[in-house]
Amino acid sequence: MPVTWSDAADEIIGGDLTAAVAYVTPAGGAVVTAVAPIGLRDRAAGTVTFTTSLGFGRKLDRLRREPRVALAYHARDHGLSERPEYVLVQGRATIVEEPDREYLEGVVQPAAERFMGPPKRGVFWDRWLSAYYADRVPVHVDVERVVVWPDLRCTGQPDVFGSPLPAEPAPSQSPPRKGTGPRVAVDAAQRKLTRLPHRLLAHVQPDGYPAVLPVKIGAACTAGITLSAADRVLPPGGRRAGLLAHDYRPKLIGLAARQHTGWLQDGVYAPHTESGFTAPANKTLLLLGNGYLARRGLRRARRAAAAGPRA
C-alpha cells in the first residue's frame, strides 16, 4: 500500500519553493543539496518528485546504485504555505531517464510556473533555454515514510506516516583512511556558513536512509565547526555527514549555497570538501547562466553516455 500523509504535510510538500535532497555516498556518508520541487507529488500513489540536471553525472550514478534518498521541506520562504511544521520525506528514487514530453509540458512546466512565473519567450530565449529544459530529468521517489515535526527546529515528538523510525541511532562508523580532521580552512568555512540562513545536516540512519535536519552553526575550533540542534537531532558518535547552508530569493531569482562533506564527531563537524555558488538576483542574468550551464551539462552527459557506465 502506498504511504499516505496528512493534509498539513501535503500543503507543505505542495507549497515549498525549496527543499533539500540528500543521497548516500559509496562510503556511507550523505550529500545534501537544495532543489526546487515545485510541488510535484502524487498523494494517492505515495510519490514525490523533483528534477535534476543530466550534467550531474556523479549524483545520477549514485542514485542508480543506491536509490534511498530524503527530501527535507525546511523553509516557508517565498512559497505557497505558511504552516510551521518541518517535513522529512524518505523513500527510493527512480530516475526517469527519458522523460515523456507530455509529462514535462503538461505537468512539470505548469507546476514550475506556479512558483516562478511564466518563462521568457522569443526567438532567442526559446533557443537558449531549450537546452535548460532538455537538461532536466524527473526523479520520482516512492515514499517509505514521512516525518513531521511541530516546528522548523524539529523540537518535540514527530508524527510518522509509513515505516516507523529506527529505534536507536546508527553506530559510529569507521574513520576514513585519511583521518577525521578538517581538510579545508575551518575559519573561512564557518564564516561562509553563518552568512546563510538555512543550515542542514545530512547523515545515514541505521536503515540506510539519509536524514536531513536543521542545525545551528557555532564557533570554529581546531577539530572543526561546532554544531547545535534540538534534542535527538544530532547523532552521537562519529560518522560521515553532509552539511548545507543556503539562501534564496522570490522565484529563485537570487541564490547562494555552501556545501561540505566531512566527519561529524559528537557535535563537531570537520569539513573535508567544500563547494558553493552565488547566482545573481537578476532574472536575465540568471536565465543566461542557466542556459549556459545546461548546455555544458548536456555535453558532459553525452560524453559520459558515449564512454559507457562508470566503474
Image (cartoon, grey):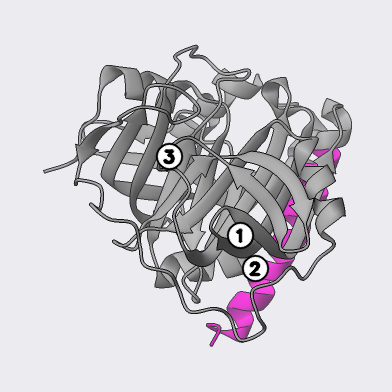
Sequence-earlier tag: 2 or 3:
3
Q: Quadrant of residue 272?
A: bottom right
Find residue 132 and report its horizontal and vertical position in percent: 69, 46
Q: Secondary structure at mark 2?
A: helix
The mark found on residue 54 in the picture is 1
Q: Are marks 2 and 1 in contact (CB under 8 Å)?
A: yes
| Residue depicted at 70% across the width and 20% down the height | 250
Q: Do the CB atoms of the residues marked 3 and 1 lie less than 8 Å apart? A: no
Q: Position of residue 54 (x, y in %)?
A: 61, 59
| Residue 301 sits in quarter | bottom right
- Eye-nearest disc, 3 or 1: 1
Q: Amino acid at mark 1?
A: Leu
Q: Nearer the viewer, residue 311 or 232?
A: 232
Q: Is residue 229 left or right of residue 3?
A: right
Q: Which residues are magenta?
A: 287-311
Circle number at residue 182: none
State the residue position of label 2.
301
Mark 2 is on which residue type?
Answer: Ala
- Nearest the viewer among 153 and 246 is 153
For image coordinates 57% across by 18% down, the residue present is 79
